[in-house]
Amino acid sequence: MKLKAIHIFFILYLFGLFYILFLYNRQIDLSWLVKGGWDELVELQRPRTNLIFFRTILRYLQTMNYATGMRNIIVNIGGHMLLFTPFGFFLPRLHSRWQKPLVFLIWASIVMVFIESLQFVSLSGSFDVDDAMLNVIGAWLGFLFLRKPEEIERDYYDREIS
């Protein structure tokens, strides 16, 4: 398979994403493997894990009155969506199977849960369903708004005729 420019840019995007999600101001720590195994990991991550939708987002919105509140909203909510918008641009261009909206959403969701799981086990972040949801929304926005104009026009006319 010959690498096209889109493949190279996608690989560069993935390297940048890995750096931001796992290395920038973070440290990968796998010491839990020898200290106590899975139980140790769960205890270390318990305070930082969120399995309830909108808990983290509501916490950000509640701090809006404070000096750093608006910064938290922009960085955390907007940052998650913006960080994964290119994912929604690249994935449908890499293979035709990811051009179908439902297939794209399913794969994007799987990838985001996988990323959150890697952050959990590497102690470089936490597992937060709100982060995964915001990442999927960002990818979806990239999927919808970064399409070629002729694809958007074709979809519009296909819906109008049906």
Image (tube, rainbow, N blue to C red):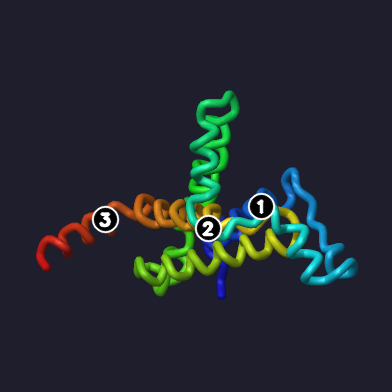
Instruction: Find residue 50 and report its horizontal and vertical position in percent.
Output: 59, 56
Residue plotted at (52% across, 53% down):
130
Instruction: Find residue 132 and report its horizontal and vertical position in percent.
Output: 53, 57
For the residues bearing labels 1 and 3, Cβ distance under 8 angstroms: no
Residue plotted at (33% across, 54% down):
148
Up-down relation of residue 109 to residue 17 (above or below)? below
Question: Farthest residue toward the top?
Answer: 67
Q: For residue 28, what is the image quadrant?
A: bottom right
> Of the residues shown, which amino acid type is indicated by label 1?
Leu
> Of the residues shown, which amino acid type is indicated by label 3?
Ile
Q: Which circle's residue, 1 or 3, is located before the other in the chain? A: 1
Numbered tag placed on residue 21 in the rendering: 1
Foreground mark, 2 or 3, reads 2
Instruction: Find residue 76 and report its horizontal and vertical position in percent.
Output: 56, 42
Report the front residue among 29 and 61.
61
Q: Quadrant of the N terminus?
A: bottom right
Residue that badge 2 annotates = 52
| C-alpha span from label 2 to label 1 | 21 Å
Numbered tag placed on residue 152 in the rendering: 3
Secondary element under disc 3, as helix, strand or loop, is helix
Q: Quadrant of the C terminus?
A: bottom left
